[in-house]
Amino acid sequence: MDRKEIAKGMLDGAIFYHGHRCPAMPLGLRAGLYALDLLGVERCRAHELHLVCESGPAHATMCFVDGAMYATGCTYGKGAAHRVNIGKNAIILVEMSSNRAVRVAVKPEFFEQAMQSEFVRLRSQGIPPQDIAPEIVNPLIDRVMSLDDGEMFNASDIFEMTIKRPVGTFDLKRCDGCGEAVFGNCVQEQNGRLICLECAGGVDKGLVK
Ligand SMILES: [Zn+2]
Ligand SMILES: [Zn+2]
C-alpha cells in the first residue's frame, strides 16, 4: 500500500487521539510515514526507533508532533520520543539498532503558505480549533493528505546518529519522606533516608519546559 493510503487509514484514529481536526497533525502523520519509508523500517512497537521532535515549547503548528508520534509509534510515554525545543516542524527518525537516521522537515515555502490560511488566522485570534468550521479546516486536511511528500517535505540522506537514552529501571523504592513508590533512578539519600526528588525540594510540577 502506498503511503498516502496508509495515512488515510490512520487519519481517524490520529484525529481521535489528537482531539481535534487541524492541518498540522495530519502533516506530522505524513512526515512520520515518510520517515519510516525512507529508513525502510516498520512502525515502532517498543523501543526499536526513536523520534527527535524539533518543535519548540509553544508555537502554532505544534500539533505536527502528535501526528508524527502516531505515525511512527514513537511516543513520548514509552520514552521513544523527545523534543529539542528549537521551533521547527522537523523530525529525525532513528533506528536504534543501527544508528541510521533520517530527517524530514516541512518545506519553508509550504510552511509559510500554510501560515497564511484562514484556519491559522482564526487560531491566532484565540478561536479553539474545534470551533472552526469544517468548511475551513477540511480542505486543508484534504490537501495535506493528497499532496506528494516531495511537495511538502525536505528529506535528508540517511546519516548516523546516536540517541543517548537512559535504560529503563525496574527498581522500585519507597520514599522515606512521603511514603510514595518511586523508581530508583529518581531517589536520593539524605541523612541516611531515601527520599524522592519532590521531598528533596525544588520540583515545580507546574513548569512546562
Ligand atoms: Zn491540532
Ligand atoms: Zn517523597
Image (cartoon, helix red, strand yellow):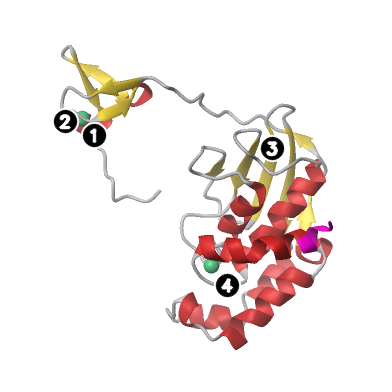
**Can residue 98 be seen in this snapshot?**
yes
Whole-angstrom CA distance, mark 4 to mark 1, is: 37 Å
Ligand 2 lies under 8 Å from the Cβ of mark 2:
yes
For marks 3 and 1 on the same chain, the one whose residue lies earlier in the sequence: 3
Reading the image, the residue beneath label 4 is: 22
- What amino acid type is highlighted by mark number 4? Cys
Reading the image, the residue beneath label 1 is: 198
- Discs 1/2, front: 2
Ligand 2 lies under 8 Å from the Cβ of mark 1:
yes
Residue 173 sits in which quadrant?
top left
Secondary structure under tag 1 reads: helix
Q: Quadrant of the N terminus?
A: bottom right
- What span is colored magenta in the figure? 1-5
Name the residue at 78% across, 71% down: 146
Name the residue at 79% across, 41% down: 39
Residue 52 sits in which quadrant?
top right
Reading the image, the residue beneath label 2 is: 178
**Can residue 124 be seen in this snapshot?**
no
Q: Residues within 10 Å of mark 3 (few under 14, many from 20)?
A: many
Circles 1 and 2 in contact, beta carbons < 8 Å:
yes
- What amino acid type is highlighted by mark number 3? Val
For marks 4 and 3 on the same chain, the one whose residue lies earlier in the sequence: 4
Ligand 1 lies under 8 Å from the Cβ of mark 4:
yes
